[in-house]
Amino acid sequence: MKKQTYDNLAKISVATVTMQLLKRGIRNVSMSGVRPLNDPVQRLIGPAYTLRYVPLREDLSTPDVLGRPDYPPRVAIESAPDGSVLVIDGRGRGDLAVIGDLLAERLKIRGVAGVVSDGGIRDCDAALAVGLPLYAAGPAAPASVAGHAAADIETPVACGGVAVFPGDIIVGDADGIAVIPQALAAEVARDGIEQERYERFAKLKIQEGRPVPGVYPPNEETKAEYEEWVKAGEPEA
């Protein structure tokens, strides 16, 4: 992701991102059941690095697999690139943890931007104390092997009802998580800046007592007024 795209995404909300994607015909982008756990909420932006779980299979879900060097979750912890977002397909099982505080600590030290999962977080208070942005279903005590089998990394996954492909751009704020197809990230970020500029103008007009019809969305008269407002340097009053 180019720096300009990152910087633009950092200035706009997840709500704006979803609207920009909707305008491009991309609707299923907002994760369900995945919420920000940090207090205060920490913004999150970065390319997806994916980890996928499948349902429990007894020969693959034993405590001893945790020590195997090829165990996918351990590989993911050590392989997720600096600045990436580890997106974990937890199968929508908020009662099963996908990481805990030790793994969160390692991810932060390695420079990973954050974790997103529709599963739970173990030792949640300690994990949040690490300071890594965590977006998940909530706290959960049982370890992943209590109900998951680890499948693979860097493949398409489902998380919160949304398809996530490796390299998709993940954005998170107090409204939750949205997924931007990588090829659309630059234009969504660029046009999102303009959308929010107009929305600032529209809010000023509504605060002045103007009715919403004709302002949001704008009619031709309001568009002309907006252009003059921009030329005037976007005055607050």
Image (spheres, rainbow, N blue to C red):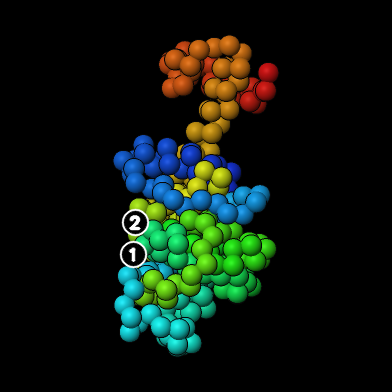
Is disc 2 in contact with disc 1, using a CB cutoff of under 8 Å? yes
Residue 56 higher or lower than 136, as above or below:
below
Label 2, on which residue? 163
Label 1, on which residue? 156
The residue lying toward the viewer, choosing from 29 and 37, is 37
Answer left or right for 227 relative to 89.
right
| Residue type marked 1 | Pro
Mark 2: few/some/many CA within 10 Å (<14, 14-19, 20+) = some
Q: Residue at x 36, y 36 (%)?
A: 23
Q: Is label 2 in a helix, a strand or a loop?
A: strand
Q: Disc 2 or 1, which lies upstream in sequence?
A: 1
Mark 1: few/some/many CA within 10 Å (<14, 14-19, 20+) = some
Q: Position of residue 106 (x, y in %)?
A: 60, 74
Q: Position of residue 24 (x, y in %)?
A: 34, 40
| Residue type marked 2 | Ala
Q: Residue at x 45, y 76 (%)?
A: 73
Residue 25 higher or lower than 218, as above or below:
below
